[in-house]
Image: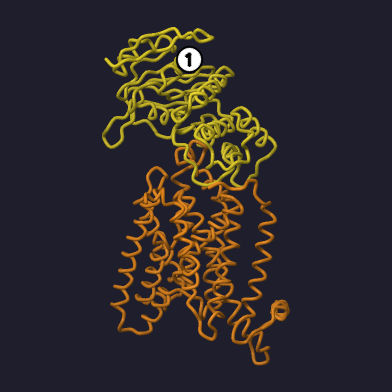
Chain colours: A orange, B yellow
Amino acid sequence: MSLALPRPPFASVVLALLVLLALVIVVAIGAGSVPIPPLRVVRLLVASIGEPWSGPDADAELVILMALRVPRVLVAAMVGAALAVSGAQMQGLFQNPMASPDVIGTSTGAALGAVLAFVFGLASAHMAWVPVLACLGAALSLAAIYGLTTRRGRTPVAMLLLAGVALNSLLSAATSFVISLSWVRYEVAQEVVFWLMGGLDDRTWTHVWMAAPLVAIGLAAAIALARDLDLFTTGEEAAATLGVDVERAKQRVLAVAALLAGTAVAVCGVIGFVGLIVPHAVRLVVGPSHRRLIPAAAIAGAIFVIAADLVARVALAPLEIRLGVVTGICGAPFFLWLLARYRREVGA
Amino acid sequence: MSLRVEAAGMSIGGRWLLRQATVQVEPGRLVALVGPNGSGKSTLLRLLSGVWAPTEGTATLDGTPLARVPRRGLARAVALVPQDTHIAFAFSVREIVAMGRHAHLGRFEREGPADRDAIAQAMARADVTAIADRDATGLSGGERQRVLIARSLATDARHLLLDEPTASLDVAHALDVLALCRRLADEGHAVAVAMHDLNLARRYATDAVLLRQGAVVASGPAEQVLTPSAVGEVFGVSVTIATAPSPDGSSIYVFSRR
C-alpha cells in the first residue's frame, strides 16, 4: 500500500470529525415517528440543561427527546467509540489489519457472558453483572485467540481468521446450548435473543450510566497505551529493546480491548464490523500512529454507529431494521475487499 | 563501558542454542559474529541486548547484570536492529526513526527540541533524510534496513547490535551499511554485527567471534580469528586467500567445496 504522505494536519481532522459528530447527533435525535427539526433539537437540548424534563407539565417533545432519543444516541456513540478503539487496539496488537472484536470471536465471547448473566438470574439481581460477565467473556476469548495464533508478536492472517471462525462457532454453539436450556422461560429467551441480534431499541439512561464509566476508562487507558502499540509495528523484540515492557503492555492492551468490546456488547449486543471498518478508514486519513488513530477512531466510530442506527430506524420506517443488519451490509463487502487485497498474505 | 556475556548459554525447551559463550563488545570496536546458520549468532545478540536472559552464565552492562538494569535505561544504552525488518502499517520513515526516542520520553510527553535533533541527526547519519516522509512499508529492503539503523541511532545508545543487516541487501547497499557501522565504531560506538559474508567481515570488522553449533570457536582481533584454516574448519569448506586487484589491494577468501 503506498500512501500519499504527508497527511492532513491532525487537528483539522479531529475538528472535522467533531463537527460531523455534532451534526449526526442532532439529526439522529430529531429523526423518528415524531420528527423534530434540527434547530428545535438544539434549542430543546440547551433549554433542558439543569431543568427537569419529566413531570406532569413537561413539554411532550422534550420528554420524547430526553427519555427515548438522547439515551439511544448516547449509547450508540459509546458503542461505536468502544468498538472502533477496541478494533484499532487489536489490529495493533496482532499487527494484522483483519483483527476486530467480531471477526476473532471477542464479541461472541462477550455475548455468551451477557447471556449467562441473564440465564443465571444475576442480571435481575443487579444490572452490573451484565457488563462484568460480558467483559470477562471478551477477555477470555481474546486471550485464547492471542495464545493460539501469535508467535513472537506476529500473527499470520490466515491463522487469525481460521482461529476466529472456530472460536466464533464454539462460542455460538455454547450460547445456543445455554438458550436451549432456558427456552422454557420465555422472558429470559427473549432477552437472550436481543444480545445475539444486537440493537439499540429501548436503550435507556440505565444503559448510558452503565456504559459511560467503563467506556471512559477504556478510552483513557487506550490512549495511554498508544505509543507502546506503535512500537509493536517492527516486532516484539524490537519493541523490547526500545524500552517497552512487552509482556505487560500486551496484557494491558488485551485487557483494555476486552473491556471496551465487552462493554459495547453488554449494552447493545453483537454489532458486526464496526471495529474492522472504522480503524481502517481512519488509518488511511491520519496514519497508523495510535496516538492519533485511537482518538480519531473513537469519534469516527461514534459517528458511524449513530448514523447506522439512524438508517436502521428511518430507511423502512415505521419498520425498524436491526442495527447489526445495517453494519453488516456496510461491513461484509468491505471485509471481502480487504481479504482480496491481502490475498497474497492469506495464501490464496 | 562495555557490554559482555560471560560463560553464557541459552536453552529453550531442553535444546541448547548457545553454550558457554564469552563475548565482549567495547567502544571503538566492530565485532563481527560469524558462523553457519544455526550456530548461535542471533541468540548471542539476544543475550547481549537483554531480550533473552541467559540460562547459564551472565550478561552485563558495565558490570551490572542486564536483568538489574532498568528497562528504559537499557534501551538508552543498547540498541538492536532485528533481522526481521517487516513493518506492518504505513508509518512514515520519520515516525519509525522517532520510535527510537521512546525510552527518553514519559508516557504522555511529546518530542522536544533535543529529541527532534537526535532524530534528524540519526536520519542524516543513516542517509534516510531524503525519504523521511515516505511510507515505510513501500521501501526496498536496503532502505528499510537503513531506517531501522537510523532508529537505533536515535536512541543515543552507545552499543549497537545488528542481526544480519546485509542479508537482504545488494552489494552496494551492503557496503554502505557496513561502512556506516565501521564509522560508528571509529567514532566510539560499540558495535556487534552478525553476518554471513566473510569477505565483508574481513574487510570491515576490527574483531570477530567465530561460532559453530552454539559454541564460540574463536574470538579476538579479526585478522587472528578469521584465518583461512579456522573459517574453513567452521564452515566445512576449503579456503584460500587471494589478493584482489582492487584499488586498496585487499585480499579476499576464495571458497571451494572440500
Q: Is B101 on the left-hand or right-hand side of B223?
A: right
Looking at the image, residue B216 lies above or below residue A346: above
Tally the numbered discs. Answer: 1
In the image, residue A232 sits, relative to residue B192, either above or below, namely below
Which residue is labeled 1 in the image? B203
Q: Position of residue A116 (x, y in %)?
A: 36, 72
Residue drawn 61% across the image and 30% down it: B122
Q: Nearer the viewer, residue A25 or A265?
A: A25
Percent across and percent down for residue B123 are 62, 32
Q: Position of residue B171 (x, y in %)?
A: 48, 24
Residue A149, horizontal then vertical, whole percent: 36, 50
Residue at x 35% of width, y 76% of height:
A119
Instruction: Identify the subunit bearing mark 1.
Output: B
Quadrant of residue A212 within the rendered picture: bottom right
The residue that appears at 39% across and 33% down in the rendered structure is B53
Q: Dot 1 lies on which element?
A: helix
Q: Amino acid at mark 1?
A: Arg
Q: Is residue A316 above or below residue A263?
A: below
Quadrant assignment, res A308: bottom right
